[in-house]
Image (cartoon, rainbow, N blue to C red):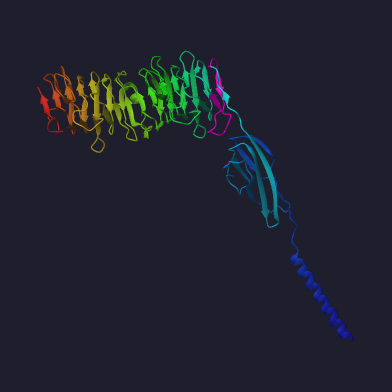
């Protein structure tokens, strides 16, 4: 072979060798440098929130890692779900007992790796509250699942010392049992929160399963806050009254009730006896109770706040008021503000008024059959607006349904403006007269203007010879459908 050919062949061989080396280098890929670590196995209780942590997973080249969590095994019947399956740390809630096997897959351009963690979940049995509370007692939240009871009550429990119930506690009551918080030592401090309300429920979650709570304690520390009271009202708590809770006035019981729920009770949601001191009442909800949302005396009606809800599927979506009196509180006005959800006050029978009673625009008062309002002292000051009238009417929209309103008060603050009063005059209110409104007695007075007086079984307004009303009473108001006429003025 000539020298020139040998040189050409050598050059060609070198070119092929270098090209081959270059191709081999491009095809070389790194090995799997990534390792998954799903964390240590865990033992938990049913209802617990399990924390999953893949932060110990590594890549030897410090490249970013992608995470994917998934169940490889769950107990039968479990519907548990991983909250954020593609994050480094996540959670799930254990819903049934047994073994949960969770697989973590980590990956990037260097490959992927898998690891598993096993969570064993056991059931925690509730504690039976078998004895009365005779010494200071604290009930702790033992089970995170709000559907499972921390404590069971199988017989009536009397609270004769301080009982503190922590957020998240669930107490389940056997059929017809009750919790009684007594005076002379009994105190209930039940403060839940928005995420962990306290729940007092029936062992069976049906309306009217257990009896309910009887509250007699006059301690000013008594508090219900973020409490759910459900499934009570199986039998009367006092007299013939069934309710989720009965607060008794004989001992002048005191309690603050805020942000609480009274639901699925077999009678009223709440019964408040005359003499009770409602220290606070705000943003409560009454839902699906068999009777009215609440049964209360007239003297406590002003303590019910504007933002509580009484119209959520109850047997009667009202604030029901039994025969009682509104008593004077020094020189302070007693104000009925009405409610955001337009709940009417319903007066079942006669209400006597000795207070400085003020009705705000938008207030609705319904009167039961033959019920009567008697302004004996103090005054009634009912000033609505053209856009938001005050309404006083019968429960049924029929003429002569309730008895009427009589004013003996001599105050010049007795005023009706932009008010609609209808359906009175069922029977004689005074001096044999049927009427919606009677102004009666020495120096009794009333100013009525821009109002509608309608549907009386007798007169719209009756004024006896000793009483005073505004001179333009007949022309400054609308009279409609009063059986015996607009006005009788002696």
x and y percentages locating residue 293 in the rendered image: 37, 29
Q: Nearer the viewer, residue 258 or 366?
A: 366
- Magenta stretch, residue numbers: 132-152
Residue 482, located in which quarter of the rendered image? top left
Residue 53, located in which quarter of the rendered image? top right
Residue that sits furthest to the left in the current view: 490
For the image, the number of numbered tags is: 0
Residue 433, located in which quarter of the rendered image? top left
x and y percentages locating residue 447 in the rendered image: 18, 27
As drawn, 487 above or below 22: above
Residue 134 magenta-highlighted: yes
Q: Is residue 283 among the parts visible in the rendering?
A: no
Residue 239 magenta-highlighted: no
Residue found at x 50% / y 23%: 189
Query: The C terminus appears in which quarter of the rendering?
Result: top left
As drawn, 127 above or below 66: above
Give left or right: position of 474 versus 11. Answer: left
Q: Is residue 198 among the parts visible in the rendering?
A: yes
**Main SS category, magenta section:** loop
Query: The N terminus appears in which quarter of the rendering?
Result: bottom right
x and y percentages locating residue 233 in the rendered image: 42, 25
Give left or right: position of 86 versus 291. Answer: right
x and y percentages locating residue 45 in the rendered image: 62, 34
Residue that sits furthest to the top in the current view: 184
Give left or right: position of 486 versus 217. Answer: left
Q: Nearer the viewer, residue 50 or 200?
A: 200
Give left or right: position of 308 versus 87. Answer: left
């Amino acid at each position: 072979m000539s020298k020139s050919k040998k040189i050409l062949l050598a050059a060609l061989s070198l070119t092929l060798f270098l090209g081959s080396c270059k191709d081999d280098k491009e095809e070389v890929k790194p090995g799997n440098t990534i390792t998954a670590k799903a964390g240590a196995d865990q033992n938990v209780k049913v209802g617990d929130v399990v924390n999953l942590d893949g932060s110990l997973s590594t890549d030897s080249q410090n490249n970013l890692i992608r995470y994917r969590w998934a169940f490889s095994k769950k107990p039968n019947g479990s519907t548990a779900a991983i909250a954020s399956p593609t994050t480094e740390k996540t959670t799930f809630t254990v819903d049934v007992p047994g073994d949960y096997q969770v697989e973590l897959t980590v990956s990037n351009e260097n490959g992927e790796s898998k690891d598993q963690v096993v969570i064993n979940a056991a059931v925690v049995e509730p504690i039976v509250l078998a004895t009365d509370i005779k010494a200071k007692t604290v009930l702790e939240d033992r089970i995170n699942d709000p559907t499972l009871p921390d404590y069971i009550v199988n017989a009536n429990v009397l609270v004769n010392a301080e009982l503190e119930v922590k957020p998240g506690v669930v107490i389940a009551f056997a059929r017809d049992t009750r919790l009684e918080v007594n005076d002379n030592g009994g105190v209930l401090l039940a403060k839940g929160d928005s995420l962990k309300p306290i729940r007092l429920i029936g062992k069976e979650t049906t309306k009217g399963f257990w009896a309910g709570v009887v509250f007699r304690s006059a301690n000013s520390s008594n508090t219900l806050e973020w409490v759910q009271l459900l499934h009570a009202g199986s039998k009367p708590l006092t007299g013939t009254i069934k309710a989720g809770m009965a607060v008794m006035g004989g001992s002048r019981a005191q309690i603050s009730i805020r942000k609480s729920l009274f639901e699925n009770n077999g009678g009223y949601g709440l019964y408040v006896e005359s003499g009770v001191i409602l220290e606070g009442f705000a943003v409560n909800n009454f839902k699906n109770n068999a009777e009215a949302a609440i049964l209360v005396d007239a003297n406590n009606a002003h303590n019910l706040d504007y933002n509580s809800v009484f119209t959520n599927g109850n047997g009667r979506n009202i604030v029901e008021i039994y025969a009682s009196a509104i008593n004077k509180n020094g020189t302070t006005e007693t104000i009925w503000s009405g409610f955001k959800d337009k709940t009417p006050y319903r007066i079942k029978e006669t209400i006597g008024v000795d207070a400085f009673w003020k009705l705000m625009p938008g207030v609705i008062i319904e009167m039961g059959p033959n019920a009567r309002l008697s302004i004996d002292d103090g005054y009634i000051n009912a000033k609505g607006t053209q856009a938001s009238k005050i309404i006083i009417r019968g429960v049924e929209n029929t003429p002569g349904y309730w008895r009427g309103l009589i004013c003996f008060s001599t105050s010049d603050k007795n005023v009706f403006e932009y008010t609609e009063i209808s359906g009175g005059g069922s029977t004689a209110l005074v001096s044999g007269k049927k009427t919606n409104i009677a102004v009666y007695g020495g120096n009794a007075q009333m100013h009525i203007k821009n109002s509608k007086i309608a549907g009386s079984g007798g007169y719209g307004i009756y004024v006896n010879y000793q009483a005073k009303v505004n001179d333009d009473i007949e022309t400054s108001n609308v009279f409609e459908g009063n059986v015996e006429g607009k006005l009788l003025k002696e």
